[in-house]
Image (spheres, rainbow, N blue to C red):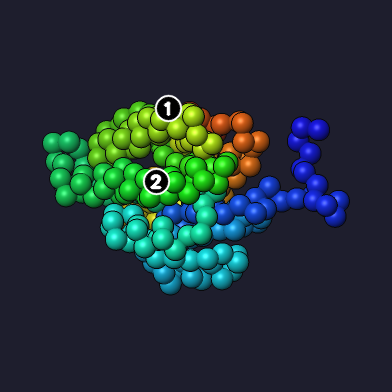
């Protein structure tokens, strides 16, 4: 019956991720950490990848996961990470970020290069390395956490929107290329998500970062996005969630946000 979890031989419901290995990048904080926690609770064997091994190891210990160092911008790091994996059923490409809010006229090209390297080239690098394992699994999922910034542009977001448009294009091309393979290609595009580091890394000021969410009733949090990711990768494998756009109710569009008096 649709919607009823499969039963194990003992007659008890089987967890959706049972027996599957899920790799989550950028897992030391925010959406990555929340996703790793949720997938572990769903029964996945979770492998965490990020640069900050202190935070990663602490999280891995608390959820029963495996932590491995990973810098997706470094080819040797990606090669070592891939070599340490026995199998991969799910890859959650979450690592990314925004690093400035400059106009094009005031563009910092070093920041542009960093933004593109993390959000596009690094994502391609890791995806390429793990695709053979995803195909070999017989029912692989490669999921990209992109952004509504990959669907529309806005002032002061040129470097980030350009990079996330690149991510969105990557997803579309890969889905076409993998159509004859047992691998789903999924994109989750969040809008306004209040996490501890995203806006701070971009604006480099706690006051400016706080102002992004000021007056917004219930912006999304990392757990909301993790819930969407877990749902997408636990659908029957013939069901592909091509693109899920998820925003808080207070954000009707990228530029249309309702703010209450504070």
Residue found 67% across the figure and 53% down from its top: 18
Which residue is painted at 14% across and 41% down in the image?
Answer: 106
Instruction: Locate residue 198, reporting x and y percent.
Output: 38, 51
Rendered-image quadrant of the N terminus: top right
Q: Looking at this rendering, what residue extends furthest in the front direction?
A: 136
User: Which tag, 2 or 1, sits closer to the chain's start?
Assistant: 2
Front residue of 210 and 50: 50
Residue 244 visible to an observer of this rendering: no
Q: Which residue is at 42% across, 27% downward?
A: 176
Q: Which image quadrant for residue 165? A: top left
Q: Is residue 196 above or below residue 168?
A: below
Q: Name the element at disc 2.
A: helix
Q: Which mark is residue 176?
A: 1
Residue at the right extreme? 11
Crowding at dot 1, Cα within 10 Å, few <14 / some 14-19 / many 20+, comes out as: few
| 91 left or right, relative to 20 | left
Find disc 2 in the rendering and name its residue: 127
């Amino acid at each position: 019956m649709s919607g009823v979890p499969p039963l194990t031989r003992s007659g008890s419901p089987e967890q959706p991720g049972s027996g599957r290995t899920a790799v989550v990048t950028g897992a030391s904080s925010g959406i990555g950490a929340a996703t790793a926690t949720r997938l572990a609770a769903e029964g996945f064997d979770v492998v965490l990848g990020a640069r900050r091994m202190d935070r990663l190891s602490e999280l891995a210990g608390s959820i029963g996961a495996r932590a491995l160092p990973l810098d997706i911008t470094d080819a040797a790091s990606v090669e070592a990470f891939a070599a340490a994996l026995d199998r991969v059923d799910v890859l959650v490409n979450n690592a990314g970020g925004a690093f400035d809010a400059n106009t094009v006229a005031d563009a910092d090209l070093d920041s542009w290069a960093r933004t593109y390297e993390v959000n596009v080239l690094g994502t391609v690098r890791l995806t390429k390395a793990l695709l053979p394992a995803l195909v070999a699994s017989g029912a692989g999922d490669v999921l990209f956490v992109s952004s509504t910034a990959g669907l529309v542009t806005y002032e002061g977001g040129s470097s980030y929107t350009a990079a996330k448009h690149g991510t969105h294009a990557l997803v579309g091309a890969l889905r076409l290329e993998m159509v004859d393979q047992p691998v789903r290609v999924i994109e989750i595009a969040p809008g306004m998500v209040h996490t501890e580091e995203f806006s701070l890394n971009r604006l480099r000021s706690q006051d400016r970062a706080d102002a992004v969410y000021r007056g917004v009733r219930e912006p999304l949090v990392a757990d909301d996005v993790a819930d969407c990711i877990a749902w997408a990768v636990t659908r029957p494998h013939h069901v592909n969630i091509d693109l899920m756009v998820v925003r808080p109710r207070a954000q009707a569009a990228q530029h249309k946000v309702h703010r209450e008096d504070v």
